[in-house]
Amino acid sequence: MKKIDKIVIGTHNEGKFKEISDLLPSYIKKISPKKLNLPSPREIGSTFKENSIIKAKFFSEKLNLICISDDSGLEIDILSGAPGIYSSRWAGPNNNFDIAIQKVFDELSLKNQNWKQEKTISAQFVCCLTIYWPNGKYISKTGFVKGKIAHKKKGKNGFGYDPIFIPNNYQETFGEMNSVLKYKIDHRLNAFKKIKKIFI
Ligand code: ITT
């Protein structure tokens, strides 16, 4: 297979763009659809995998280039996996994660008023990465990181739900954690490990 020397990172999310850029070899030229003013496709899939393929196919076809895309989110066990594929949508049209995180707390309180006193609120971050080639070939792989929901927001690092997610075997939230450490244990790395041979 021809070595990949240029790739579209098919996301409008700057946190994801940076993390995926750092996972890829430095010699690969990384292209941002946001910088090209390309809008995102509608995420009409019902799984992370379907939405990840929709994004990768869309940007690959628009630019006639190989694209890697990510569909990801937070699944909370006692909320039956919500927000799940709606993780981004819980933040509303202005992508406000104060709103999304408040919604998580409100939904947990609706389920159980005493959720802070009860046992651990287990959750996981999920990420499906898809690499899509202009000839229509693609590969999709999913990775996870398990953890629990913090009782309040903590930390200013990262993005999205990072301030309320404490990964298993750690005491601090992803929002408090140094990004170098987060990148070594998270769902995106675990998905990437399953496809990285493509880049070797
Ligand atoms: P693109 O579709 O343009 O990639 P998006 O942010 O809308 O950007 P998703 O539809 O995949 O992406 O939504 C994923 C959401 O899940 C994202 O907005 C975050 O809120 C959350 N999320 C995913 N990975 C995360 C991480 O590592 N840390 C914190 N939140 C994360």
Image (tube, rainbow, N blue to C red):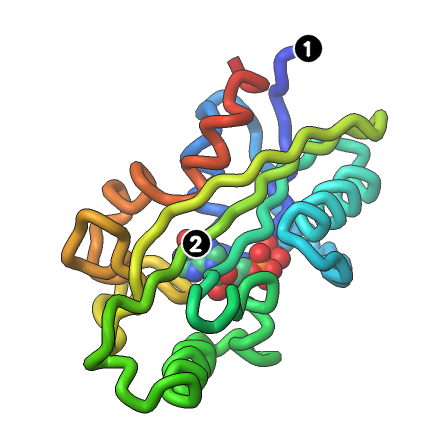
Residue 25 shown left or right of residue 32 in the figure: left
Mark 2 residue crowding within 10 angstroms, few (<14) / some (14–19) / many (20+): many
Going by the numbered disc 2, the residue's amino acid type is Phe
Q: Is mark 2 within 8 Å of ligand 1?
A: yes
Which residue is identified by label 1?
Answer: 2
Judged from the image, the secondary structure of the residue bearing numbered disc 1 is loop
Which residue is identified by label 2?
Answer: 125
Residue 8 lies in what quarter of the image? top right
Query: Closer to the camera: disc 1 or disc 2?
Result: 2
Residue 194, position in %: x, y? 51, 27
Residue sitting at 35 percent across and 50 percent down?
146
Residue sitting at 24 percent across and 71 percent down?
119
Q: Is residue 25 visible?
A: yes
Residue 26, position in %: x, y? 45, 25
Whole-number angstrom distance, CA of label 1 to CA of label 2: 33 Å
Residue sitting at 39 percent across and 62 percent down?
159
Among the two numbered marks 1 and 2 on one chain, the one whose residue lies closer to the N terminus: 1
| Whether label 1 touches label 2, CB < 8 Å | no
Residue sitting at 43 percent across and 89 percent down?
110
